Amino acid sequence: MALEGFIFVNEADFIEKNHILTIVGLMIFSDIIDYTLGVHPWLFAESQWNIALVSIILLSFFVGIYFFLLHKKRCI
């Protein structure tokens, strides 16, 4: 599903800064809900919880940066 999102964003011409902020905000909100309510994807072992949490934080951060760089590139 994430790959489909990247394909869609690369082809979309209507993305503005407000849209990017909304997308990143929803991703962060989803991550908070997943890991505070315990509805995150199934993990094989309890020891994977910290790795999964760090991974999702980094992924959300880098996806947000990618969206902003993509928007900046299109505005030039």
Image: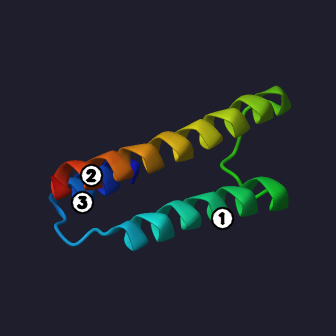
Foreground residue among 68 and 9? 68
Q: Residue at x 83, y 26 (%)?
A: 47
Amino acid type, label 1: Phe
In space, the residues marked 3 and 1 are separated at their CA atoms by: 21 Å
Q: Secondary structure at mark 2?
A: helix
| Residue on which the image places disc 1 | 29
Q: Quadrant of the N terminus?
A: bottom left
| Residue on which the image places disc 2 | 72
Amino acid type, label 3: Phe
Foreground residue among 36 and 46? 36
Label 3 Cα crowd, 10 Å radius (few <14 / some 14-19 / many 20+): few
| Residue on which the image places disc 3 | 8
In space, the residues marked 1 and 2 are separated at their CA atoms by: 24 Å
Label 2 Cα crowd, 10 Å radius (few <14 / some 14-19 / many 20+): few
Query: Do residues under tags 3 and 2 come within 8 Å of each other at their CB atoms?
Result: no
Residue 43 position by quadrant: top right
Q: Secondary structure at mark 1?
A: helix
Q: How many numbered discs, if any?
A: 3
Q: Is residue 8 left or right of residue 31?
A: left
Amino acid type, label 2: Lys
**Where residue 56 appears, x then y in whole percent?**
61, 42
Asked if 64 appears above or below 23 in the picture, the reply is above
Q: Is residue 21 left or right of residue 71?
A: right
Q: Residue at x 62, y 58 (%)?
A: 28
**Where residue 66 appears, x then y in whole percent?**
37, 44
* Circle nearer the N terminus (3, 1): 3
